[in-house]
Amino acid sequence: MNSGSIQSENFLDRESSLGVLLMLPGLILLAVFLAYPFFLGIWLSLTDTRIGMPGEFIGLWNYVDLLEDEIFHQTAWNTMIYALVTVPFKAVMGLGLALILNNQIRFSNPIRAFIMLPWIVPTALSSLGWFMIFDPVFSPISWLMIEMGFIDSNINFLGDQLIAVTAICWVNIWRGIPFFGISILAGLQAVPPELHEQAAIDGANKFNRFNHVTLPHIKGILMITSLLSVIWTFADFQLIYVLTKGGPANQTHIFGTYAYQVGLSGTEIGMGAAITLYMFPILAFFSIILLRYMRKTA
Amino acid sequence: MEKVNDNQLKSIPEEMTENGVTRRQIIKTGAAAGAVALMGGFPNISSAQNKTLNIVRGTYFIPAAQEIAKQQAEEFGKQAGVKVNADFLNWPDLQTKIGAGLQAGGVDVIELWPVQNHLYANNLVDMTDEAEEVASRGGGFEEYVLNSGHVNGRYLGIPHGNNAGTIAYRISAFEKAGVKHADKGGMDMTWDEYFAVAKECKKMGMPFGQSLGHSLGDPIGFCYPYMWASGALEVGDDGKTILFNTPTFEYALNKFVQAWKDGYDETGTSWDDSSNNRAYLSGKIASTFNGASIYYASKRRDDGGKLMNDTHHMLLPKGTAGRYHEFGTQTMGILNNSENIDVAKEYLKWWFQPENFDKWWRVQEGYQLHHVKNLANDPMWQDDPKMGIFKEIPKYGRLRGFAGNPNEKASLAASKYIVVDTFAKAVQSGDAKDALEWGERQLKRIYR
């Protein structure tokens, strides 16, 4: 055995060097696909760059300017509503779904797979389906309600502020329920059945058993799924873009769609980057809570 | 193939064919095509092997035109020995694709909507020579092309006309509402008269339809002309002074708000560019602002010509400040970061040859207005008198950003739907004054 191969064996034997080596591919991927775009985004947001035109460094001007932008205010408010209203609904409905699926029912596996569909189907595709359901002129819901005599004219699903916000929140909830349902189901199945049996022997009814046995066991999963869902919903784009493109009159714009409109359609890519980066502290806040919680429970 | 020399060409009298093309031009074109064939391809394309030409165009409301454009791209690829990808994108996504192409490459030829030649002026290949060749071959560009096709005297792409929008209406509904000569088309109405007809039609269960959603075609095509006709502008000719919130426009916008309740399908706040087509073709609405695609589709319906015979067109109505249409030319441009500029140029020169371009243009039956004067007398226009009104539209055409320049600020205002959203806010809240003040504040931010 020559000295070169001995050296390489030593190198691979050392935990520190082997660890770095194993992390390298992941590190390169993160650097290329996450860190580079992120830092490029920060740089762009500090310039007045337009698509196809070099920009100049303007400091925090884009960020300051957005504070005076009424559409941005509306966008920020819409995003908060969109993320914070939908998540509790997804959590409660997902929990209900998980409790149903946790019972011994026939064809439980195909049913579980079927219920995952809204989560599995690409959002752009499922949103197109909802776009047809909410069609202002040919909505099957409007048609049915008119036929049944409940209403006289079509429902303006995506053209009235309150109904449009409700409609997009509903589609987001519909898409998110399976994620909560399946995650919570995994937690429910990890609850030892003996605990339920003992509680029942002690006289606890179903509600008490749920409150004092089930809930403490799935609290962690509920927390993690809710935080993940808030983060994903904040950063949503496809659903809104397909359904309303931020309309009517910007009443459904969220950070992603407004940034797209200003940065790509309007070519002010520096300003568009600043809009998206306003999401960063909010997402960072939720991510830190999530990571701290996960570390604590681990 | 026999070669035709210049002396032989000069000996041929300059008689116009029925297409308005001279025999000499036809022979010249044929000779050029023959030369290409004899030389075995396109001499200006250097080492074409392994080259891929990426063409991006807007999706067509006339499906046959899209099919022909696609076939022609493939045909060029075969002749030139290059691989050709032709993509047809939803209109609002074109700018995004241009942006992606400029940042990351991968786009060679791009179909530019009016004003986009100004917006991307620093990123497009100068094609003045090629454009002027197309113009001279076609008897000169139409006036609207001369006004809107160039950027500071340079053609940054070859103009190819534009799909013009105007009012399509049901003759029977208009007649029932008391409009005289509705069957003749081309009525010279004011907005007040048009709204009065809308009210009557809605009473009959067939309202008017207008998209006020976030879509770049019909909402802008309707709202900008209404603004101009009501004595308001996004910005004055100094490019800075906002002339949007004027008393005459406030008055007119209040009228529109009332008309929206009385005469329109109020779900229009969420309509896109295709919603009004579907609503009209299914008999839900009596009139709408649209390109000729509604009439084109009505001609192909299996209803014994019922809808086609009951459909006609008129120009947008007049307001207190006149009649306007939002209209300029589209151009086929080449991004200057393309690695295939030589191939892209050859493609465009080839596609604009009359035997290719005219085939694509004629199949649209007037949906796409012609770019060169010779096509104004094309037999295609004689086939259907109901299409004649579309040729009038350029006379009333203004570009976004008028009376300022059609620059990046005008484009940002359009991309942010400021004017359209002013209309949408007004009809939603019923408060035209508040909506106008909002629009004015937004425009001041853009044009500062």
Image: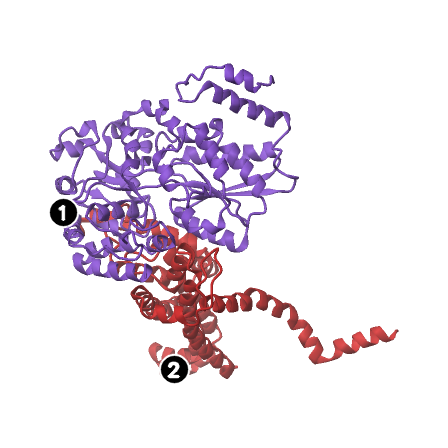
Where's the N terminus of chain B, which quadrant? top right
B19 sits left or right of B259 in the view: right
Q: Chain of mark 2?
A: A
Q: Colour of chain A?
A: red
Q: Chain of mark 1?
A: B
Q: Is residue B446 above or below residue B118?
A: below
Q: Foreground residue, A262 or A53?
A: A53
Which mark is on residue B199?
none
Residue B183 in view (yes/no): yes
- The secondary structure type at the circle numbered 1 is helix
Residue type at mark 2 is His
B444 sits left or right of B206 in the view: right
Q: Quadrant of residue B38?
A: top right
Q: Is residue A205 above or below residue A174?
A: below
Name the residue tied to disc 1: B262
Q: Foreground residue, B440 or B105?
A: B440
Residue at 56 percent across and 22 percent down: it is B31
Instruction: Kindly indicate whether the residues beneath marks 2 and 1 are on one polypeptide chain.
Output: no
Residue type at mark 1 is Asp
For the rendered model, the colour scheme is by chain
